């Protein structure tokens, strides 16, 4: 069983990112298990409290959880043309201590979304820059910028446009290909 961790860059319970992530999670083939990873409980990263005898329990739990996954799917909104602080913090926590990053070598995929027309372009590209620094191979094509997210979802949070569902399936297929390539 290949395990995919899903990190959502929005803490809002009814966030568009969370709903889109749930739709995408259902598109993985048999043999792939997805799991949402909580990031809202992580204290802001501070090296002073990440010492050998002083590591916050939330850091340790998060790092151990990420280690269990074979790959990571990031689904995020854009905040101020970049990555939300909560997602950046989770990446920082997982990348420390130096030389022990839990992200190293894990295949990744990025979906950004926005209620506007740009589809979170800035967040998507800033996140990709971070993932390069973390040595995570990332799905290059297709790129996933989801525009007008509110209009895309029905009252149950399901993607109602069949063309978008087909696009998301092609995205998942590319991610699965990347994961298999990295497992070989």
Image (spheres, grey):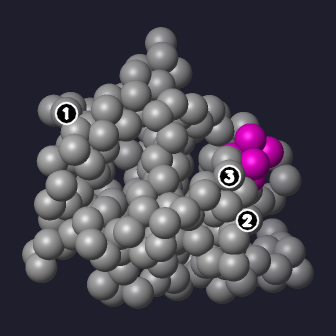
Front of the two marks 3 and 1:
3
Image quarter of the N terminus: top left
Q: Which residue is mark 1?
A: 29
Picture coordinates of residue 29, whole percent (x, y): 19, 33
Q: Which residue is mark 2?
A: 92
Q: Label for residue 125? A: 3
Front of the two marks 3 and 2:
3
Which residue corresponds to the image point at 42% horizontal and 58% vertical from the top-left?
146
Which residue corresponds to the image point at 19% horizontal and 60% vertical from the top-left?
159
Which residue corresponds to the image point at 74% horizontal and 41% vertical from the top-left?
132
Which of the marked residues, 3 or 1, is nearer the chain's N terminus?
1
Region rendered in magenta: 129-134
> Residue 85's quadrant in the figure?
bottom right
Residue lying furthest right in this view?
48
Q: Could you tell me if the residues under marks 3 and 1 are in contact, i.e. CB atoms within 8 Å?
A: no
Q: Is residue 14 left or right of residue 80?
A: left
Q: Main secondary structure of the magenta part?
A: helix
Front of the two marks 1 and 2:
1
**Image vertical order of residue 172 relative to residue 7, above or below:** above
């Amino acid at each position: 069983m290949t395990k995919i961790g899903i990190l959502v860059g929005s803490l809002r319970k009814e966030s568009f990112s969370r709903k889109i992530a749930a739709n995408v999670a259902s598109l993985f083939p048999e043999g792939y298990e997805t799991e949402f990873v909580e990031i809202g409980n992580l204290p802001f990263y501070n090296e002073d409290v990440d010492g050998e005898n002083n590591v916050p329990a939330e850091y340790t739990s998060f790092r151990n959880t990420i280690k269990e996954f074979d790959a990571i799917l990031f689904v995020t909104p854009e905040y101020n043309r970049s990555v939300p602080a909560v997602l950046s913090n989770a990446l920082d926590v997982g990348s420390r201590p130096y030389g022990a990053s839990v992200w190293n070598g894990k295949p990744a995929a990025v979906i950004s979304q926005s209620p506007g027309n740009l589809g979170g372009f800035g967040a998507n590209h800033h996140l990709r820059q971070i993932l390069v620094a973390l040595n995570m191979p990332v799905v290059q094509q297709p790129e996933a910028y989801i525009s007008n997210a509110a209009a895309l979802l029905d009252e149950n949070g399901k993607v109602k446009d069949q063309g978008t569902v087909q696009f998301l399936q092609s995205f998942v297929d590319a991610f699965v290909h990347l994961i298999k390539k990295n497992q070989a």
